[in-house]
Amino acid sequence: GKVIFLRAPSTDVYLTYENEAFPRTKYWDKLLEKSACSGIYFEDYPSLSEFNCPEWSHLLPDDARKFTRSFVAILLEEKHLKPRN
């Protein structure tokens, strides 16, 4: 199979903590480089970065459905998935 890493949204103090404790260049970029896998980082996609996480790292059910639809659209657009016929 094909592995594609996803950096899911987080917000507020949790996002600040993650960015300080696990800088993207030191962790995310290295993960993709060492694994030779693709990755989708939520902040790189407007359709994935528009969500507010009420407890900083989880989406509300309606937002989770919207996020999943947007995520799948990106996977299709970037040819990580093939459309169903």
Image (tube, rainbow, N blue to C red):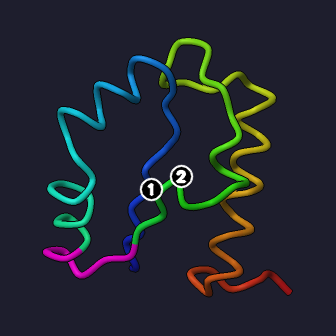
Q: Going 53% across and 52% down the picture, which residue do you hit?
A: 43
Crowdedness near tag 2: few (<14), some (14–19) or many (≥20) residues, C-alpha within 10 Å: some
State the mark number for residue 42. Answer: 2
Identify the image quadrant of the C terminus.
Answer: bottom right
Q: Is 85 drawn above or below residue 63 in the view shown?
A: below
Q: Is residue 27 left or right of residue 24?
A: left
Q: Is 23 drawn above or below residue 46 in the view shown?
A: above
Q: Is residue 61 left or right of residue 40?
A: right
Crowdedness near tag 1: few (<14), some (14–19) or many (≥20) residues, C-alpha within 10 Å: few
Residue 41 position, x and y percent, is 47, 57
Per the image, the residue denoted by label 1 is 6
Quadrant hosting residue 75: bottom right
SS for callout 2: helix
Identify the image quadrant of the N terminus.
Answer: bottom left
Q: Is residue 29 left or right of residue 26?
A: right
Residue 37 position, x and y percent, is 31, 77
Q: Earlier in the sequence, mark 2 or mark 1?
A: 1
Residue 7 position, x and y percent, is 43, 50
SS for callout 1: strand
Q: Magenta segment range?
A: 33-38
Q: Going 36% across and 27% down the picture, which residue do you hit?
A: 16
Tag count in the figure? 2
Q: Is 77 drawn above or below residue 63 in the view shown?
A: below
Quadrant hosting residue 17: top left
Q: Going 70% across and 81% down the picture, which residue do you hit?
A: 77
Q: Nearer the viewer, mark 2 or mark 1?
A: 2
User: Label 2 sits on what residue type?
Assistant: Phe
Labels 2 and 1 touching (C-beta < 8 A): yes
Question: What is the C-alpha distance between the residues marked 2 and 1?
Answer: 8 Å
Residues 28 and 61: in front is: 28
User: Label 1 sits on what residue type?
Assistant: Leu
Residue 2 position, x and y percent, is 40, 79
